Amino acid sequence: MLWELFAAFAKIGLFSFGGGYAVIPLLEREIVDLHGWLSSAQTIDIIALSQMTPGPIAINLATFVGYQTAGILGAVVATLGIVAPSVLFITVGISVFRKAEGGDSLKAVLGGVKPVVIALIASAAFFITTSAGVNIKGIVIAVVVFFLANKNVHPVWLIVFSGLFGIIIY
Amino acid sequence: MEGMEEGKVKIAKGRTWRLFAGFFRIGFFTIGGGYAMIPLIQHDIVEKRKWLEDEEFLDLIALAQSLPGVITINTAVIVGYKVNGLKGAVAAALGAGLPSFLIIVLVASYFLNFRDNIYVQRFFTGARAAVVGLVLYAAFSLGKTTLRTKKSWLCFIFGLSLLLVLDVHPAVVIIVSGLLGYFFFKEEGD
């Protein structure tokens, strides 16, 4: 179990590009579809919770899933799993990118990855809407949140107010 | 990448602990992760401690965002590595990750008891809808800056259809898009 946690979150760490919401499809696939550690709705709850607490979504989810499946040790193992690829990649791999040629190739690779990061984020919105039971009322909230986010309202407030609004209308 | 070429790693005593403490504080006070922490690190590392130059710092941030992994941790590892080698990298990563770890363990041990409460459930039904709005907005605002050429739109649509229509594993989609980029964008260097 511990090894499975470590491996799953190391995979998530290794293949998350662009950070934040772009990680959601990967999390869904590993945590919900492959391992069944959480339901879709539970996963999104933790993402909402992550927006209200300090720290990155991916780390928060790793800690939470690890804790729920295997207690405090599970939390440690899952969190280390998601951090390990960053540490390895940067400290070992940095010398590879030092060469100018390596830099150009990396840029070309990222030219393909960046648009797909947006596709990942867009598909995340789709997955959440369909799998976490967002109904018509929810879609109205989502639209309002979209426009308020565009007006630079901080995500914490948007989540908190939507949650309080949810208590009233649901 | 430029930031890594010039200037060697600057190792000095006493920095490891200060890196840990600095990133711990930053990790603790950044809600929403990632991009929100950049001005805080800049203040701490560049302006206060003067461990890095402004331009050097911006190059490192660009690098942190283009490598795989959690951006917050990447940033901590790169800045830590640059300031104090491997020791610095580990200290900064631990510092940045620890606050979120501690808080979630605390929340998890309480939240699991309250999850079935009707008000908590209603709260999260509303919050989930808000997440959809936030995610859509993230795609929209990133798309404005990234999807500027025909090629990038093609990559976007290609990726989206792999994900939504063919239900391909996101890791596979990333690998394929990287390969595609390697051949597609090679000449431009873009």
Image: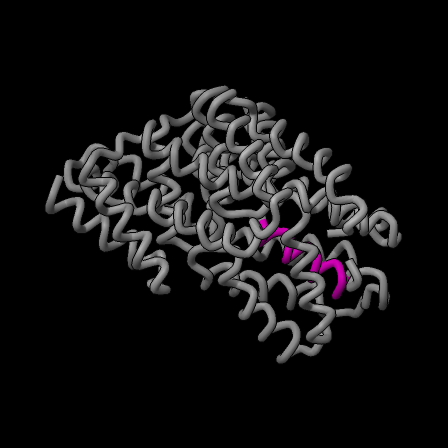
Of A151 and A74, the residue lying toward us: A151
Q: Residue furthest front?
A: B150
Residue A45, position as x, y percentages in the image: 33, 39
Taking the spot 51% from the left edge, 33% from the top edge, the residue there is B160
Taking the spot 30% from the left edge, 47% from the top edge, the residue there is B130
Count of all numbered marks drawn on residues in the image: 0
Q: Is residue A8 magenta?
A: no
**What is the basis of the colouring in this image?**
one colour
Residue A77, position as x, y percentages in the image: 57, 35
Tell me the chief SS of the magenta region: helix
User: Relative to residue B5, is residue A2 depicted above or below?
Assistant: above
Look at the image and tell me whether residue B101 can be seen: no
Left or right relative to B117: residue B84? right
Q: Is residue B78 magenta?
A: yes
Taking the spot 22% from the left edge, 48% from the top edge, the residue there is A163
* Quarter-of-image position of residue A125: top left
Q: Residue furthest left?
A: A168
For the magenta stretch, what is the residue range? Answer: B71-84
Of B105 and B179, the residue lying toward us: B179
